[in-house]
Amino acid sequence: MTDRNADHVVVVAGALYDRGRLLAARRSAPPELAGRWELPGGKLEPGESAEKALVRELREELGVETEPGERVPGEWPLKPGYVLRVWTARLLSGEPRPLEDHDELRWLARDELDSVDWLDADRPALAAAVERL
Ligand code: DCM
């Protein structure tokens, strides 16, 4: 595996769930995305598998240990040259804290998913992910 697939940089994100709720993270940067909510994650590093990248990113950003589940079918365009891929993920240990890139976290029940302002790419990704939780 590489950090690029064809000519796209792959961003992996986790639909992290625990006790029937899904974690939403509010971005603190860059300015044009700050205040919008996302499934936490980040870019693959060279030579890293998607699952390893996801576990690493969730550890760095949230301070938790997680276990990737299944890939959510689909791929969503981000800014030019970037695509978003999503995995379900289970919380193994720790309580998520906004250590990097986020300034607020919220556990959302199914009927609360529309209560935050998701990033554009995350809306369809989230809809697909929720079917698999
Ligand atoms: N991104 C997104 N949705 C996510 C994760 C990331 O739209 N769930 C976007 C935001 C950035 C790019 O991907 O434009 C790279 O993310 P980061 O800055 O977190 O590495």
Image: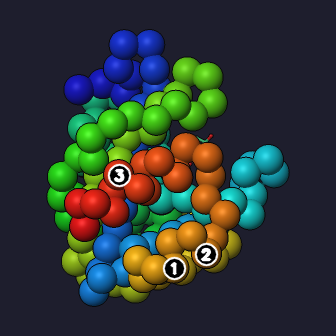
Type of residue at label 3? Ala
Type of residue at label 2? Ser
Near mark 2 (Cα within 10 A), the count class, few <14, some 14-19 or many ≥20, is few
* Circle 1 SS class: helix
Residue 102, position in %: x, y?
A: 62, 66
Near mark 1 (Cα within 10 A), the count class, few <14, some 14-19 or many ≥20, is few
The quarter of the displayed image where residue 12 is located: top left
Q: Counting residues from the N terminus, which is met first, the one under dot 1 or under dot 3?
A: 1
On-image quarter of the N terminus:
top left
The reply to whether dot 2 and dot 1 touch (C-beta < 8 Å) is: yes
Side of 17 relative to 126 (left or right) = left
Image position of 127 with respect to 98: above or below? above
Q: Quadrant of ligand 1?
A: top right
Residue 48, position in %: x, y?
A: 28, 36
The reply to whether dot 1 and dot 3 touch (C-beta < 8 Å) is: no
User: Residue pushed farthest top?
Assistant: 7
Report the front residue among 28 and 16: 16
On-image quarter of the C terminus:
bottom left
* Circle 2 SS class: helix
User: Residue pushed farthest front?
Assistant: 111
Type of residue at label 1? Glu
Image position of 17 with respect to 125: above or below? below
The quarter of the displayed image where residue 50 is located: top left
Residue 41, position in %: x, y?
A: 45, 53
CA–CA distance in space, label 1 to label 3: 16 Å
Image position of 63 with respect to 41: above or below? below
The reply to whether dot 3 and dot 2 touch (C-beta < 8 Å) is: no
Residue wearing tag 2: 115
Residue wearing tag 3: 128
Residue wearing tag 1: 112
CA–CA distance in space, label 3 to label 2: 17 Å
